[in-house]
Image (cartoon, rainbow, N blue to C red):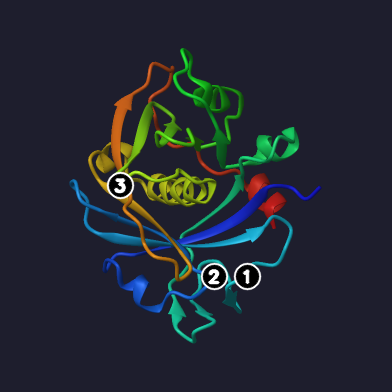
């Protein structure tokens, strides 16, 4: 069985939502706006772990690329390994920078925080409650992503939000800055549906909440 793991390359368009104007069938991204944040668009290029990256041609991390529409793509500013909700192999989970799970609510414990405690290289864990939104765990903080228009909470949305949050944190910005912001997942040419509202709280775990640097071994394993 193929691993539910992917290598994600991410970059940010600080000009806002211009990415929507040139999206193609393979496009994936997250709109960030509202609250106290400057509107921005996070573009994501996802490849199955071990496969050549798709969506860009002649791409070299840190250098510009050209997508299939012929438009220049900004340099990659974040590259991370994601273990999806169907991945239960310890070797993949132990080297993932981002983990997405399916969880039930209510729960008396902190199921997402346990991944952070056991996996020091993991930075973001997102749980899909499959109905009431998404829960997020990063070091020192917890967040809830509440749907703003009802509808299903899909694994695809969870994966997009998790990768956008990873980019946000590794670029040096605290999760608190997203409090009351709105995230909207965009996939291909599908209709853009209402996004989620972010609420953030402090966690009780030990530690100061600073991001854990990505390990070179993880990046090598993901290529």
Location of mark 2 (residue): 26
Q: Residue at x 74, y 58 (%)?
A: 50
Label 2 residue SS: loop
Residue carrying label 3 = 149
Mark pair 2, 1: CA separation: 9 Å
Sequence-wise, the earlier of marks 2 and 3 is: 2
Which one is closest to the eye, mark 1 or mark 3? 3
Residue positioned 27% across, 66% down in the render: 16
Helix, strand, or loop for circle 1?
loop
Would residue 146 be found to the left or right of residue 85 on screen?
Answer: left
What residue appears at the point 68 percent right and 47 percent down from the top-left corner? 4
113 lies left or right of 85: left
Q: Position of residue 27 (x, y in %)?
A: 49, 68
> Which residue matches tag 1?
54
Split into 4 quadrants, where in the image is the C terminus?
bottom right
Residue 86, image quadrant: top right
Residue 203: image quadrant is: top left
Q: Is residue 18 above or below residue 7?
A: below
**Tag 2 near tag 1, CB within 8 Å:** yes
Q: CA distance from mark 2 to mark 3?
A: 25 Å
């Amino acid at each position: 069985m193929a691993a539910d793991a992917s290598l994600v390359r991410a970059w940010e368009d600080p000009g806002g939502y211009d990415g929507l104007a040139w999206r193609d069938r393979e496009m994936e991204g997250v709109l960030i706006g509202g609250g106290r944040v400057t509107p921005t668009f996070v573009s994501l290029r996802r490849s199955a772990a071990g496969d050549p990256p798709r969506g860009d041609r002649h791409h070299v991390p840190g250098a510009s690329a050209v997508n299939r529409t012929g438009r220049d793509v900004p340099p990659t500013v974040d590259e991370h390994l994601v273990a999806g909700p169907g991945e239960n192999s310890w070797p993949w989970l132990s080297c993932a920078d981002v983990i997405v799970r399916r969880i039930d609510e209510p729960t008396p414990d902190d199921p997402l925080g346990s991944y952070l405690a056991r996996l020091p290289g993991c930075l973001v864990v997102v749980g899909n409650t499959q109905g009431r939104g998404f829960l997020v765990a990063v070091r020192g903080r917890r967040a809830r992503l509440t749907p703003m228009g009802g509808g299903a909470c899909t694994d695809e949305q969870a994966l997009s939000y998790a990768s956008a949050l990873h980019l946000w944190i590794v670029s040096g910005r605290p999760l608190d800055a997203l409090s009351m912001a709105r995230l909207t997942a965009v996939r291909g040419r599908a209709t853009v549906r209402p996004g989620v509202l972010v609420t953030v709280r402090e966690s009780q775990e030990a530690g100061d909440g600073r991001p854990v640097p990505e390990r070179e071994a993880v990046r090598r394993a993901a290529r």
